Amino acid sequence: MKKTAWIAACLVVVSPMLSAVGAAESSRRGQNRVEARVVPPEPQFFGTVTYDTGTNAGFHPDGTNGGNANRTVGNRFNSALGGPLLMTGMVTMLTAFPASNGIQSVSIATTPTPANTATVVAFVNASLMAGQFNAVPIAATVPPDFLGIFVGAFNNTNPAGLLGMSDMANGNQGYHAIQAFYAAGAQTMIEVVPNRNAMIRATGDILVPVELMDFKIQ
């Protein structure tokens, strides 16, 4: 009951922000600015889903398909340690490994539709350090299948590479990297990046495999 009440309270706080995301994201500077912090390559945050191994095999997208200011990169978070994520809950932090220094953005989007689109439900801007894991606070209510996205600077001069990529799976969890394009409050043209896990991690109260649940009767 306490957890249910806590989640309900969070929804009251977050809902007004979510309703304005589409409009706010069109003006990316000076809004939703948070303080990021550099963290170790293998952060031990409770409730963190980590698909990458911590070793960067190259920044994506590469030179053959990069350079578009609206391109985004991230992971589809839909499992952990071989099991599905739990029911709807809160994501409180995204941890990203960017290619560039400066003000950049991370976003959370809903489950992709059959048309390969997803609605952005939260985004924040933060000053990030290149080649490091940066922990960025963010608040969003998500289903057990959602996108964690690195948006980049959105200044029409994004380099080809945006975010580090792991070419090995952490704990045999498979590959989850995706790329997309941002347009009008949505991720569009979502597609899988084969054999890669984006170096972006999601932390929250839902991110625990089913087998770790405690079913004790109170």
Image (cartoon, rainbow, N blue to C red):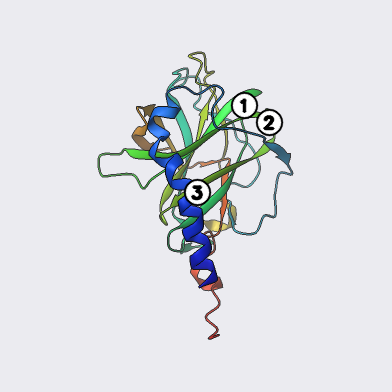
Q: Is residue 49 left or right of 8 when viewed as pictured? A: right
SS for dot 1:
loop
3D distance between C-alphas at marks 3 and 1: 33 Å
Amino acid type at image mark 1: Ala
Q: Label 3, secondary structure: give it.
A: helix
Determine the residue located farthest toward the bottom in the rendered image: 217
Q: Which mark is residue 13?
A: 3
Q: Residue furthest left?
A: 115
Of the two numbered discs 3 and 1 in the rendering, the one whose residue sits closer to the viewer: 3
Q: For residue 38, which quarter of the picture?
A: top right
Identify the residue at image location x=63%, y=47%.
53
* Residue on which the image places disc 1: 99
Q: Is residue 118 left or right of residue 174?
A: left
Labels 2 and 1 touching (C-beta < 8 A): yes
Figure quadrant of the C terminus: bottom right
Residue 25 drawn above or below residue 55:
above
For label 2, count other residues whose C-alpha is less than 10 Å away and answer few (under 14), some (14-19) or many (20+): some
Instruction: Using the numbered discs, state the Cα–Cα distance from disc 2 to disc 1 in whole angstroms.
Output: 6 Å
* Kind of residue sitting beneath label 3: Val
Q: Which disc number belongs to residue 131?
A: 2
